[in-house]
Amino acid sequence: MDIWTLVRFGHLLGVTVWLGGMLFLGLIAVPAARATGDRTASRRLITDVAKRFGMLGGAAWVLILVTGAGLVSHRNVDFGTTYGHKIAAKMVLLVLVGVAVVLHGMWQGPRVRSADEAGDEVALARWKKIGAGLDAFMLLATLVALWIASSLIP
Ligand code: HEM
């Protein structure tokens, strides 16, 4: 087996885990937890599920980056070409997604919890809206990166 097939497999596995996990969280786990109607239990469950996915998602993010860097050297990517521009765009998007994850976990997330605990509905709505914005950005940026990757070679 060619080692680069393995590296490419790792790259695609990272993308699958990252994107699949995000969709599962947003479209299945969170709505299912909210549907229980128990606000405290649902928040606790969502936080727990998100933290657990944070470990796996973080590992997938690193895997995408490391295997992507390996593929860049394997392909001798010239960043002056259209192909190189597309790879550079994917790198920028991945870094921006990483920044959004950190903001979500270390800035917005804790503020949602403290507003909820304090019973401050106005602040809670505001921080939730910011969280939804970060989520939408992460999903969109990943989909754009996937689109760019799908059009790397005509
Ligand atoms: C969320 C971000 C990313 C997504 C969704 C993504 C997705 C993909 C996909 C689907 C392919 C297969 C395309 C094909 O074979 O035609 C691919 C290939 C590739 N990716 Fe990524 N990628 C991402 C980030 C990165 C990063 C950050 C790098 C560089 C550090 C990178 C470097 C590469 C290279 C060089 C290839 C070509 C592999 C080859 O043809 O041997 N990718 N990517």
Image (cartoon, rainbow, N blue to C red):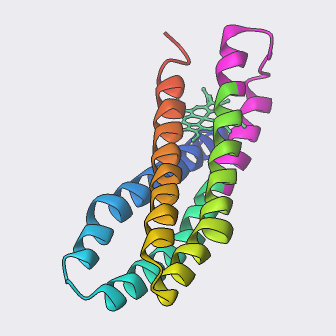
Q: Nearer the viewer, residue 109 or 75?
A: 109
Residue 101 x, y percent position in the rendering: 62, 58
Please state the extent of the stretch shown in magenta in the rendering: 62-88
Q: Quadrant of residue 153?
A: top right
Is 104 left, or right, of 18 in this rendering? Answer: right
Is 94 left, or right, of 20 in this rendering? Answer: right
Residue 97 x, y percent position in the rendering: 62, 47
For the point 76% across and 39% down, the residue is 69
For the point 32% across and 70% down, the residue is 30
Q: Nearer the viewer, residue 134 or 21?
A: 134
The relative height of residue 67 versus residue 107 in the rendered view (above or below) is above
The relative height of residue 71 versus residue 127 in the rendered view (above or below) is above
Residue 84 x, y percent position in the rendering: 72, 17
Tell me, yes or no, if residue 95 can be seen here: yes
Is 44 left, or right, of 11 in this rendering? Answer: left
The relative height of residue 129 versus residue 78 in the rendered view (above or below) is below
Is 83 left, or right, of 149 in this rendering? Answer: right
For the point 39% across and 82% down, the residue is 43
The picture quadrant for ligand 1 comes to top right
- Magenta segment, principal secondary structure? helix
For the point 80% across and 15% down, the residue is 78
Residue 4 on the magenta segment = no
